[in-house]
Image (tube, grey):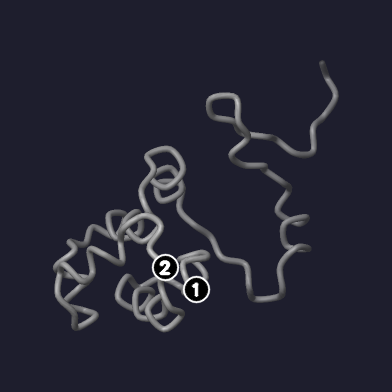
Amino acid sequence: MNTPIRHQIIEKDGLPLFVLVPYKEYLSFVEPGEATSIPLAVSKAVNMEGKSLVRAWREYKGLSQAKVAARMGISRPAYAQMEEKGANLRSITVQRLASALEVEWAQLGDNAE
């Protein structure tokens, strides 16, 4: 088949995970200055390994839980709870996490309540 495709669907176990779209089309879906990126390693850790986005970013940045907790001024166990998959975090907590991880708030996705 020589028909060019515009979108590519990436599946795992027969279920769609991602749709790749041309970058110009993607930009039409977001507000100016809102486009953020997530490294492939972070995306794989979340979608293929089942890690939380917060944990995936921490590991990608090469930081320990203790280091991130210290940057936030909290205990390591308190931070570990924030890193659990499905943690229901307040917006201010997500902002503090983003600062400690040195990422943009939007790169932590929909972690805020």
Q: CA distance from mark 1 to mark 2?
A: 6 Å
Point 35% across, 78% down: residue:
99
Asked if labels 2 and 1 touch by Cβ distance under 8 angstroms, the answer is: yes
Read off the residue under disc 1: 113
Q: Is residue 81 left or right of residue 22?
A: left
Q: Is residue 27 left or right of residue 90?
A: right
The amino acid on which the numbered mark 1 sits, given as a three-letter code, is Glu
The amino acid on which the numbered mark 2 sits, given as a three-letter code, is Asn
Q: Is residue 85 left or right of residue 34?
A: left
Point 21% across, 79% down: residue:
71
Classify 10 Å Cα crowding around label 2: few (below 14), some (14-19), many (20 and above). Answer: some
Residue 70: x, y in percent? Answer: 16, 77
Point 29% across, 60% down: residue:
58
Classify 10 Å Cα crowding around label 1: few (below 14), some (14-19), many (20 and above). Answer: few
Q: Secondary structure at mark 1?
A: loop
* Above or below, comparing residue 70 to residue 46 in the picture: below
Read off the residue under disc 2: 88
Q: Is residue 2 left or right of residue 91?
A: right
Residue 60: x, y in percent? Answer: 31, 54
* Above or below, comparing residue 49 to residue 2 in the picture: below
